[in-house]
Image (cartoon, helix red, strand yellow):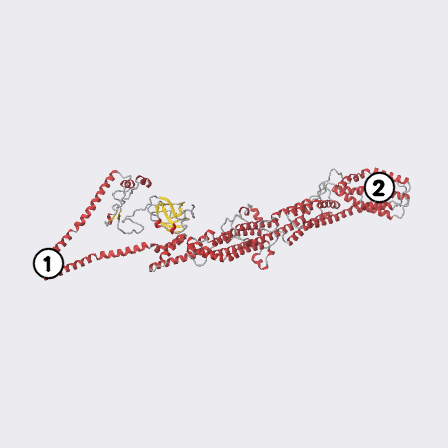
Amino acid sequence: MSRARQPPLVTGISPNEGISWTKVTIRGENLGTGPTDLIGLTICGHNCLLTAEWMSASKIVCRVGQAKNDKGDIIVTTKSGGKGTSTVSFKLLKPEKIGILDQSAVWVDEMNYYDMRTDRNKGIPPLSLRPANPLGIEIDKGRFPQKDLEALFPGMSADFTSENFSAAWYLIENHSTTSFDQLKMAVVNLKKQANKKNEGSLAYVKGGLSTFFEAQDALSAIHQKLEADGTEKVEGSMTQKLENVLNRASNTADTLFQEVLGRKDKADSTRNALNVLQRFKFLFNLPLNIERNIQKGDYDVVINDYEKAKSLFGKTEVQVFKKYYAEVETRIEALRELLLDKLLETPSTLHDQKRYIRYLSDLHAPGDPAWQCIGAQHQWILQLMHNCKESYVKEQKGNALLHSPMLDLDSDVRPSPIGHLSQTASLKRGGSFQSGRDDAWRYKAPQQVVFVEKLTKLVVSQLPNFWKLWISYVNGSLFSETAERSGQMERSKKNARQRQNDFKKMIQEVMHSLVKLIRGALLPFSLREGESRQYGGWEMKSELSGQWLTHVIQTVRLSSESLTALEIPNDMLQIIQDLILDLRVRCIIVTLQHTAEDIKRLAEKEDWVVDNEGLTSLPSQFEQCIIHSLQSLKTVLDCKPGEASVFQQQKTQEDVCQLSIGIMQVFIDCLEQLSTKPDGDIDTAHLSVDVSSPDLFGSIHEDSSLSSEQRLLIALSNCRYLERHTFLNIAEHFEKHGFQGVEKITQVSMESLKELDQRLFEMYIEFKADPIVGSLEPGIYAGYFDWKDCLVPAGVRNYLKEALVNIIAVHAEVFTISKDLVPRVMSRVVEAVSEELSRLMQCVSSFSKNGALQARLEICALRDTVAIYLTPESNSSFKQALEALPQLSSGTDKKLLEELLNKFKSSMHLQLTCFQASSSAMMKT
């Protein structure tokens, strides 16, 4: 059947060595539930139960007995746990024999010598007791190990006063190197000492014989006279004489022994005083011992001595004891004040704080030192935080600091008074919090970022000890066993329960100060007016970039994780989560604003070098800029445990949506600015021309500057690519990163892009179509041509050929930039030309037969040439133009018309090839 309790375990003994009857303190676990539960205690094999004093389940005090073994374990046996074990041992030292005439630093009680050999008390003269050197020759201690001698002479002793005295052991130990001649001299000395002892007794008797005989003679004479006279007179006379003799003898004896008796009384008084001093030397030496131990820092010894003195002399009525005990109390009161000062001194480690609280508890200090320490630590942390802020604000304003302003995460926490902080291992927000940064980073970091790094590290390094001190205060682990026995621990636990709300306010004050100091450095607009002076004061020359805000967010997050690991309630840390949310929102807004500025500067990077698809690098740079910006926000947008979504507030969604639309609009404005700049304001660039499409008309050459029409074409090509690819890709990235209102962003951006595209297209058509359209009317009526009076048509006139050549030039220019734009541009050019031609035909009042045939020939030639670019509008214009002409009545006219058309197409075959070659491209488009 298993026992209810674990077996006793001894883990410490103090002191761990000593002679017999040394008082020791045994510490360990499960050392019994009470004095009656302790049934056995052995040290080095000797039973010490009779002297054992059970103090607690972890402490026993006893005296070491006469053990056989010089070193052994400490075994405790209890009723509840049985026989225990020991992890430590005790070493029993051999006591040194002190003779009566030997010098000693301690008082040796005078007592009848106990002769162990005869087992009886003898009142023998002191000088005959235990001579220091019985052989009378020089002692030469040998180097034989004590253990070997004990094994060689089991049960024997080298002490010549012992009943188990071994002469051989004594000789080996003291005269192992003595010569034989000296040993013979030792025998002679022993014989002389024996003879002197006998002669001494005889001489004592001989010296008193004369006195004895005189007294005997006097008594005999008195007796004889009394018998002879027998008379009353003689009897009275003799009696008187005898009284006189006795009186004289008495007076003489008093005179002779008065000095001796006086000396004896004085010696007895001195001996009694010394006995008192010896017996109560603990109390008489205690004030001085207390002073010495305080200077050495041995407060445990002082407390133990004080407890002992208090139990022995606390209620004494002896005036001497009361005087000395009052002196002890004075020293202890000074010690209480010293320990309280050390407890409230900052900075201090948690270990020292617990130690001083335990000391004050054992000394029964008034008040609640533990709570005073908690309050002082709280005020110190707040002071450190404000000192840190003030030092960096002064540094920012140019005042010199004792501490370097550079960010050094491996250095101390703060400058000047903050520099005394001891580095703490904490929650090892560790490696990630203190990543390897080079010195260049420290020099580049803004002061606000450096300040937040320092401030958060300060709080994370100090708050854990503050929190652990409170936990120890609550569970009573600050106090020792003495406090537990006295009930002080229970009183402390009760006080802690009553002060929970006060401590909660302390933690909240630290958290509020941390958050407001960070807000003052990074989000000053979020502070109230009265708080700006206390927590702000920074010179905000320019707002931090998104990169630095992201770094700050990571720092605050790591601090929050470290504080959460301390098991601080979440409601106390909620204010930090609110700060992180505000920083995340601000980081997103600032990043998007800076992105808009970066995109605005993309216009400076436009090199106007087009690829085979007619695109420059601008759309790609725009897309990469957006993607890079969103990727930099990934850690900010991601929600850590306990964090809310950054888009949970409607205002944040609207602000981010407007900023995103603004970014798209900035790029659209950038495109418009690039495409509509005057020639003198545009950087010249080189266009790469597709070798498969020869530049027949010399519109674009390498090393030639771009014309405004070419820039418009490149901008149109970029707009087309943006609409079909870039904007859609960006919308996907917005959705991937959790942006809200992506559809609105895409819709508004597309509409704005299409408006720009249409404006640029109209500008290009105006540049290209208007000259062609304007040349038709002068060309038709060149040479005073009249539709009413003209010759039989011989072919298409030159004005139409010139118009076609101009259209072909437009085709070549567009084709060189972007093949995909050819159908769109050519269709609009053809629409403009057909519309103008229709207007001119409708303006003619009447046609002659030859005039009508000439007009029909030219209209049909133009229509058939640009047939692949005809649209419903241009078809309608051509139809209206033909309807304005008289109908051909004879087959001869129709045949002539057909022959002239074929002739035109044959003669212009080379020029008209571009219209045929582009048909396949048009179909693909």
| Residue name at image x 84 percent, y 37 percent | 906
Q: Position of residue 713 (x, y in %)?
A: 74, 45
> Given the image, on which type of amino acid does mark 2 rest?
Ala
Foreground mark, 1 or 2, reads 1
In this rendering, does residue 487 appear at all? yes
Q: Position of residue 485 (x, y in %)?
A: 41, 54
Q: Residues within 10 Å of mark 2 (few under 14, many from 20)?
A: many
The residue labelled by disc 2 is 861
Q: Who's the residue at 82% across and 45% down the image?
A: 875
Left or right: where does residue 273 sit relative to residue 420?
left
**Residue receiving disc 1:** 226
Q: Secondary structure at mark 2?
A: helix
Quick one: quadrant of the C terminus?
A: top right
**Image x and y of residue 98, in percent:** 29, 48
N-terminal label among 1 and 2:
1
What is the C-alpha distance between the residues marked 1 and 2? 202 Å
